[in-house]
Amino acid sequence: MSNLPVGKITKLYGTEGEVVANLYDRFPADYDSEEPLFVSIDSLTVPLFISSFTRRGRGAIIAIDDYDTPRRSEELLGREFYTTNPDADNADLADGDDEEWSDMEELLGWRVRFVGRDEEGEIVGYNDDEMNPLFEVEIGDRYAYVPVVDEFIRKVSRRRREIKFDLPEGLLDIYL
């Protein structure tokens, strides 16, 4: 992860505050728009949380949370952006994601999504079995038990209070 700029916001797009950005060659091909981009405004590093990100050749059209009018987005024009916090010393400060959890009950009420599935749920319980810890997830009017295994957790977002799981095929079907 580099603290070098990976792109530049060049112009406004549309009427909802979207912007057009040129992406530098070092922009990551596997960029996940759930991670913020960072810009420097008045000597402060500001995270930009992305609502939508659509690649267009060597550029992208980007909608940014809280920048919902062209007038508001004008302050971003001409600014270079980073995929990691340029003020951090190789630390992943993206909202505290991917850090170790000491209290799993802290995740109660978080939204749960699953790779390749439309169903979403909410964590309503945690079974602290040493050999097989499980989240109890309410999906509609049903409950599923999801193993708390690092290999199954694709993404954790504290900002969105959301966990995305990539479960083995058929595991969720047992409950639904």
Image: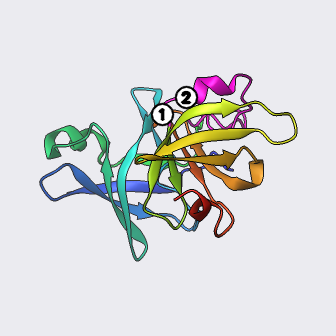
Count of numbered marks = 2
Q: Quadrant of residue 108?
A: top right
Kindly identify which residue carries mark 1: 159
Lower position in the chain sequence, tag 1 or tag 2? 2
Would you place residue 109 above or below residue 168 in this image?
above
Q: Nearer the viewer, mark 1 or mark 2?
A: 2
Q: At x 69% / y 50%, what residue is drawn? A: 1
Q: Are marks 1 and 2 in contact (CB under 8 Å)?
A: no
Q: At x 48% / y 33%, what residue is drawn? A: 159
Residue 144 can be seen, yes or no: yes
Kindly identify which residue carries mark 2: 108
Q: Main secondary structure of the magenta part?
A: loop
Residue 154: x, y in percent?
64, 54
Q: At x 31% / y 41%, what residue is drawn? A: 65
Callout 2 secondary element:
loop
Residue 46: x, y in percent?
44, 32
Q: Residue furthest left?
A: 15
Q: In screen coordinates, is 7 left or right of 1?
A: left
Callout 1 secondary element:
loop
Residue 2: x, y in percent?
67, 49
Nearer the observer, 50 or 125: 125
**Mark 1 is on which residue type?**
Arg
Indicate the colouring scheme: rainbow
Would you place residue 138 above or below residue 100 in this image?
below
Magenta residue span: 87-110
